[in-house]
Every structure is written in structure tokens, then in C-alpha cells.
Image (cartoon, grey):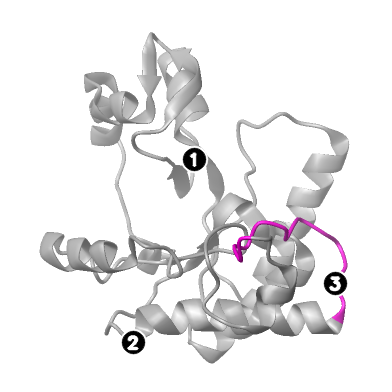
């Protein structure tokens, strides 16, 4: 998250741990101070980006401001000497088509050809949700974005496999937030860190081939 206080620490960690060539940009329109002035019209009283929301339509002035902010976030990473491998977004804000269009423009200008899809496995299904996700993910493909086959949260995927379910076939992205407390414990574990460090999760990882986004 290039507009957040931990950015410099994240860059240093990526370099020291040797994964600076496998970093995407977690594009952000929903928290923290923006990097550009144009989007401040849509910030809260404290100047933070807290009022932007998912929408199906946005006027030109908002789209221009969103484009400028996203471009600034990507360029901040590029200016460190790191080339982003892909885009995803905080609180899935890019799942709104107007914001997606802005992100795609930035992607083309910055030679980024991969973007996270909408969650399409282990979610609370409804006809509307499924229709939207299919349309959104197909749209990314038509725009030339390389994508994984499946995207879901680590918690339901882990629970699925623990219950005897088969791993998903195809490239799967598992979203995780280490340290975050779980709303509902999983096998008596209360944080995502506990899941990630659990021996059963390590066994699950041993059965699959981890790949970076650059492998897509």
C-alpha cells in the first residue's frame, strides 16, 4: 500500500528477504492519506480516503482523480527500482467497474499485465454475486490481463481441505492477513497467523507448487 506509513519498511523487507521481484501493488482508495491532491474532494474530514465506495458508475472528475491516485501509487513503487508484477486492491475496491477501468489504464502505461480476479471460490453465493463475478473476471481477460483460475480466502480453503475436500484444480490465489483475528475460530485457532504456521497448513503447502504472479 504505497500511500501508507509502512511502505518504506515493506520495501526494505522485500529486498532483505529476496522477494522484491515478486511484488504487486495493493492499490488503495479506502484508507490513509492520498498521494495526490485531486482525490481530496472525496476524502473524509481528516483528509483520509474513507468515503470512496463500490459503485457501478462514476463521473469524469472522479475517474480522473482515481486514475491520478492509482498512477501515483504505482509510480512510487517503480521509483524504488521495483517493477510490480500485478495489481490487487484494498477491500477489493477495484471490483467496481469504473475503478477497474482506471486501474487498467495505469496497468497499460506501466506495463503491468496481471490483475487479481474477484473471489470465485468459497464465498456466500447468490445469483447476483455469481453473475457479477463471472462478468468481472471475464472482463479482465478481455482486457488482456493474465489471471489465476481461482481466488479465495485462506480460511475457508483451509477448512475445506481439513474437512476432506479436494484442492482446487488450477492456479489458486489464497488471500491472507497475518496477525488478523478471526471472526470465527477455525479448529480453535483465533488468528490467521496460527493457520499459516499450523503443521496441517504446511502439509497442504507441501502438496502444491507455489508460483509467483510472473508465472501466469
Describe residue 167's horizontal placement relative to residue 60 as left or right: left
What residue would you read off at disc 3? 58
Q: Main secondary structure of the magenta part?
A: loop
Q: Secondary structure at mark 2?
A: loop
* Residue in the foreground of this view, choosing between 118 and 57: 57
Q: Residue furthest top?
A: 188
Describe residue 117's horizontal placement relative to residue 111 as left or right: right
Mark 1 or mark 2: whose residue is earlier in sequence? 2
Q: Secondary structure at mark 3?
A: loop
Q: Residue furthest bottom?
A: 109
Q: Secondary structure at mark 1?
A: loop
Mark-to-mark CA distance, 3 and 2 = 30 Å
Instruction: Tell me where the magenta segment starts and ends, as one range.
Output: 46-59
Residue 55 in the magenta stretch? The answer is yes
Q: Quadrant of residue 43?
A: bottom right
Who's the residue at 61% across and 31% down the image?
Answer: 122
For residue 169, the mark is 1
Amino acid at each position: 500500500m504505497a500511500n501508507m506509513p509502512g511502505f518504506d519498511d515493506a520495501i526494505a523487507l522485500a529486498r532483505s528477504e529476496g522477494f522484491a521481484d515478486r511484488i504487486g501493488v495493493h492499490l488503495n482508495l479506502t484508507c490513509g492519506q492520498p498521494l495526490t491532491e485531486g482525490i481530496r474532494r472525496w476524502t473524509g474530514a481528516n483528509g483520509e480516503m474513507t468515503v470512496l465506495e463500490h459503485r457501478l458508475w462514476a463521473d469524469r472528475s472522479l475517474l480522473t482523480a482515481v486514475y491520478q491516485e492509482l498512477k501515483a501509487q504505482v509510480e512510487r513503487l517503480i521509483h524504488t527500482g521495483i517493477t510490480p508484477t500485478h495489481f490487487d486492491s484494498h477491500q477489493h475496491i477495484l471490483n467496481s467497474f469504473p475503478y477497474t477501468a482506471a486501474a487498467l489504464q495505469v496497468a497499460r502505461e506501466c506495463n503491468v499485465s496481471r490483475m487479481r480476479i474477484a473471489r470465485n471460490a468459497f464465498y456466500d453465493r447468490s445469483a447476483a454475486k455469481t453473475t457479477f463475478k463471472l462478468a468481472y473476471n471475464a472482463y479482465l481477460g478481455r482486457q488482456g490481463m493474465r489471471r489465476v483460475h481461482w481466488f479465495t480466502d485462506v480460511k475457508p480453503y483451509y477448512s475445506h481441505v481439513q474437512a476432506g475436500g479436494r484442492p482446487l484444480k488450477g492456479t489458486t490465489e489464497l488471500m491472507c492477513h497475518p496477525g488478523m483475528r478471526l471472526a470465527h475460530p477455525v479448529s480453535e485457532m483465533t488468528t490467521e497467523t496460527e493457520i499459516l504456521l499450523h503443521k496441517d497448513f504446511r502439509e497442504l503447502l507441501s502438496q502444491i507448487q507455489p508460483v509467483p504472479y510472473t508465472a501466469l
